[in-house]
Image (spheres, rainbow, N blue to C red):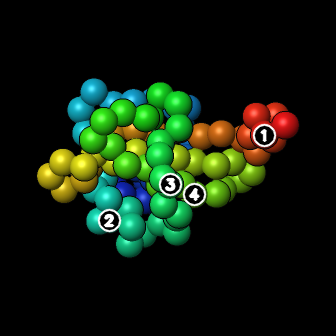
């Protein structure tokens, strides 16, 4: 069984977190497997030195993936924001 789809499914269902150690998903795999858009900067707790972020849309939520700029660009954080919450911040 390929663990990557299961990992991505778990991440979509998970609350925001920032890992102390890199998770086993690299940007190269993410870029190939997940439709996304590049972000100029990372939001909230994901914003840190040496990290870049990508966004996906799914189930009325914006999902942000944070990747390290080091090595093979491992996933180091994830957060989800509902569209309703985003709308409140844009008013």
Q: Which residue is mark 2?
A: 29
Mark 2, other Cα within 10 Å: few <14 / some 14–19 / many ≥20: few
Give the residue displayed 32% in from the left and 65% down from the top.
29
Helix, strand, or loop for circle 3?
loop
Give the residue displayed 52% in from the left and 69% down from the top.
35
Cβ–Cβ below 8 Å for labels 4 and 3? no
Cβ–Cβ below 8 Å for labels 4 and 2? no
Q: CA distance from mark 4 to mark 1?
A: 19 Å
Residue 69: x, y in percent? 25, 49
Disc number placed over residue 90 in the picture, else none: 1
Q: Which residue is mark 4?
A: 56
N-terminal of the pair, mark 2 or mark 1, is 2
Cβ–Cβ below 8 Å for labels 3 and 2? no
- In the rendered image, the residue lying farthest to the left is 71
Q: Which residue is mark 3?
A: 39
| Quadrant of the frame with the C terminus | top right
User: Which mark is in front, 4 or 1?
Assistant: 1
């Amino acid at each position: 069984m390929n663990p990557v789809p299961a990992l991505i499914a778990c991440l979509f269902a998970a609350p925001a977190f920032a890992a102390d150690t890199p998770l086993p998903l690299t940007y190269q795999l993410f870029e190939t497997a997940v439709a996304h858009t590049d972000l100029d900067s990372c939001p909230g707790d994901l914003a840190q030195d040496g990290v870049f972020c990508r966004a996906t849309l799914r189930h009325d939520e914006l999902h942000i993936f944070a990747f390290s700029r080091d090595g093979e660009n491992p996933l180091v954080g994830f957060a989800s924001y509902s569209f309703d919450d985003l709308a409140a911040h844009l008013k």
